[in-house]
Image: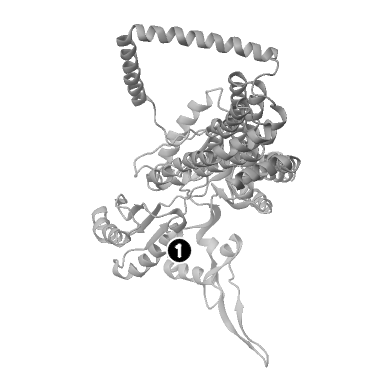
């Protein structure tokens, strides 16, 4: 323990250097509070996936026997696939919802093996199976959803504006992906008058084949020289509606020709949609913007706002861009709300210390609360940890424990002063006696939280992964503070064990403790006077506590604080898109009648993007009309 004593002595002797280092760490911690990556919840990977098989012409029973079961047998050969994996089969298609039981870091490796095995097994499936697709990327969360809407613009024009905005957004370094939802594809429709076609004696099959081959790009020869040998390509002849109309489909030796426009009408139109998006009941496109993990979502949101403002100036006045979901704003509000709660908790701890301890002792011990917290945030920033609900909750939980080491150090010092020791000897002697107990208690409390990582598995384990580490960091900072800083402060400001002149604050404290002691003694007398009633009250309190605990609503994942919400509507699998729209329109009218609702976005025939980490539409979203 000689080393411990000499260390404390040196810490007191070179206290100015210690104070400087602490000040630097506190300043860096304050900087880290603004610079650290912020998010509402920890990032975690969704390991589950979906295997889709397409078997045209087969009924549900045939698909089940010839496609679904063989695919399930292949999947269950993997040890990483849970037996809770289930399937859904309908005419011509099967869906297998695969659940994995492997660490998140091995997710991509497992899915790669599954894809390779399924591709190798295609030869054993019926020849009528069109395709087997694996969808395994469901972890992406939309940071911002933007609605692009204009009453006087077509889908083609809206797509052009959305594409321009998308290209500008890709200049943001933190951007991961931008998806444009609600796009409607165009087609050139040819409606043939069969009576007129028959009158000319033209074969419709040959005419169709002729048009298909007319747009093909073929090799039409080679260019050869001493130094190059390259093929020559001739582009297809058909690129516009007019070229299609003017194409000759029949001719006579005398030069009489018939063009397609003579026997058919040609028009450009939108394909019959299988899904589309409406914003406040009008056609719209939605941009789903995703951020790369490991970035500051608040800064990311500011970059998006800047680009949207710049691009909007170049758009016509009729084109509006509206935010549907704004996660950066939510995260900024949420994080600073937690920081506010953290500061309030610090103030409460300091006030309690001031009430229960002498003024100087309370100020010295409680000074570690803000200092150790800011140092913990600085270490989090250096280690690449995010500031989110879980890490902030850990800092709040550990607040009351941060002062423990300082209080123990102060008690040991005061006891040694009462024994007649000098201030320096009292400080070094108390640290010599208390260092090992403090170290063991700090380590015990820290280790106590780590079993939760083994108890909480799968997604919950990933969600709270940093919780015990934050507590360990904060407690380690408090131990170092009690060893390096508190001894020099107590030596400087506390000179005696209690012979100093009492201040007005100390007098008020004495009166408060006297009243508290008097009340405690009076209550104690009544408890000994009526022991049976005392024991009965204790037993009833325990039983009542257990009963009330069973009535508490248990919710492992926190509620999503949002100024928006999603309503999912599921119809029969055979329902048409028009039926889905009818239900959606009815619901939209009800919502618009509520003055508290500012806008309604409808995703008809498809699901909403995953706009929140803990939100995910029901599993059958890929199957049923929405």
| Residue 128 image point, x, y percent | 31, 65
Q: Observer-nearest residue: 598 or 539?
A: 539
| Residue 63 image point, x, y percent | 27, 57
Question: Vertical placement of 348 versus 219: above or below?
Answer: above
Res. 1 image quadrant: top right
Taking the image as shown, residue 229 lies to the left or right of residue 194, namely right
Q: Observer-nearest residue: 297 or 569?
A: 297
Question: Vertical placement of 583 versus 37: above or below?
Answer: above
Q: In the rendered image, is residue 613 in sight?
A: no
Taking the image as shown, residue 68 lies to the left or right of residue 263, namely left
Q: Observer-nearest residue: 609 or 549?
A: 549
Q: Quadrant of the C terminus?
A: top left
Q: Observer-nearest residue: 393 or 261?
A: 393
Question: Vertical placement of 592 versus 16: above or below?
Answer: above
| Residue 356 image point, x, y percent | 58, 20
* Residue that extends furthest to the bottom in the rendered view of this protein: 226
Res. 546 image quadrant: top left
Point 36% across, 9% down: residue = 528
Query: Tag 1, which secondary structure?
Result: helix
Q: Which color scheme is applied?
A: one colour
The residue tagged 1 is 197
Q: How many marks?
A: 1
Question: Vertical placement of 623 versus 231: above or below?
Answer: above
Q: In the rendered image, is residue 127 in sight?
A: yes
For label 1, count other residues whose C-alpha is less than 10 Å away and answer few (under 14), some (14-19) or many (20+). Answer: some
| Residue 251 image point, x, y percent | 52, 73
């Amino acid at each position: 323990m000689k080393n411990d004593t000499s260390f404390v002595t040196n810490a007191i002797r070179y206290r100015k250097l210690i104070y400087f280092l602490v000040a630097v760490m506190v300043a860096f911690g304050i900087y880290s509070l603004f610079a650290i990556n912020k998010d509402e919840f920890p990032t975690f990977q969704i390991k589950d996936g979906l295997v889709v098989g397409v078997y045209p012409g087969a009924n549900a029973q045939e698909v089940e026997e010839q496609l679904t079961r063989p695919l399930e047998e292949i999947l269950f050969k993997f040890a990483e696939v849970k037996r809770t994996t289930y399937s859904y089969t309908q005419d011509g298609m099967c869906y297998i919802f695969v659940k994995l039981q492997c660490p998140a870091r091995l997710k991509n490796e497992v899915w790669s093996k599954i894809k390779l095995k399924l591709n190798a097994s295609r030869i054993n499936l019926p020849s009528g199976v069109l395709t087997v697709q694996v969808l395994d990327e469901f972890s992406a969360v939309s940071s911002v959803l933007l609605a692009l809407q204009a009453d006087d613009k077509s889908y083609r024009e809206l797509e052009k504006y959305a594409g321009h905005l998308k290209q500008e957004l890709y200049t943001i370094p933190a951007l991961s992906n931008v998806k444009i939802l609600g796009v409607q594809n165009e087609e050139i429709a040819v409606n043939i008058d069969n009576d007129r076609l028959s009158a000319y004696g033209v074969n419709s099959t040959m005419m169709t084949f002729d048009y298909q081959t007319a747009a093909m790009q073929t090799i039409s020869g080679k260019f050869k020289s001493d130094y190059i040998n390259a093929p020559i390509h001739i582009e297809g002849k058909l690129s516009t509606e007019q070229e299609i109309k003017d194409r000759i489909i029949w001719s006579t030796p005398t030069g009489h020709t018939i063009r397609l426009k003579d026997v058919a009408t040609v028009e450009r139109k939108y394909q019959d949609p299988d899904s589309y998006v409406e914003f406040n009941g009008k056609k719209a496109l939605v941009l789903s913007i995703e951020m790369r993990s490991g970035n500051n979502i608040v800064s990311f949101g500011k970059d998006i706002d800047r680009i949207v403002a710049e691009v909007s100036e170049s758009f016509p006045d009729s084109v509006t861009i509206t935010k549907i979901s704004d996660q950066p704003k939510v995260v900024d509000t949420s994080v600073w709300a937690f920081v506010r709660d953290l500061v309030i908790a610090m103030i409460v701890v300091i006030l309690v210390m001031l009430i229960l301890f002498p003024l100087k002792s309370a100020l010295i011990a409680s000074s570690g609360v803000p200092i150790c917290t800011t140092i913990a945030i600085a270490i989090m920033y250096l280690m690449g940890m995010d500031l989110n609900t879980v890490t902030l909750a850990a800092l709040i939980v550990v607040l009351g424990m941060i002062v423990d080491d300082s209080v123990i150090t102060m008690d040991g010092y005061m006891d040694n002063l009462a024994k007649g020791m000098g201030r320096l000897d009292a400080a070094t002697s108390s640290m010599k006696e208390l260092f090992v107990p403090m170290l063991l208690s700090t380590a015990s409390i820290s280790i106590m939280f780590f079993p939760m990582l083994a108890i909480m598995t799968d997604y919950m384990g990933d969600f709270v992964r940093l919780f015990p580490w934050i507590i360990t960091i904060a407690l380690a900072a408090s131990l170092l503070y009690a060893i390096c800083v508190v001894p020099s402060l107590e030596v400087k400001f506390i000179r005696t064990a209690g012979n100093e002149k009492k201040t007005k604050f100390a007098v008020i404290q004495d009166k408060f403790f006297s009243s508290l002691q008097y009340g405690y003694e009076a209550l104690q007398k009544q408890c000994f006077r009526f022991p049976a009633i005392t024991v009965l009250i204790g037993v009833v309190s325990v039983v009542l506590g257990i009963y009330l605990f069973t009535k508490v609503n248990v919710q492992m994942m926190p509620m999503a604080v949002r100024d928006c919400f999603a309503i999912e509507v599921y119809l029969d699998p055979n329902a048409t898109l028009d039926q889905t729209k009818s239900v959606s329109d009815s619901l939209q009218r009800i919502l618009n009648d509520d003055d508290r609702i500012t806008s309604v976005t409808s995703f008809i025939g498809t699901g909403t993007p995953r706009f929140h980490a803990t939100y995910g539409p029901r599993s059958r979203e890929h199957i049923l009309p929405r």
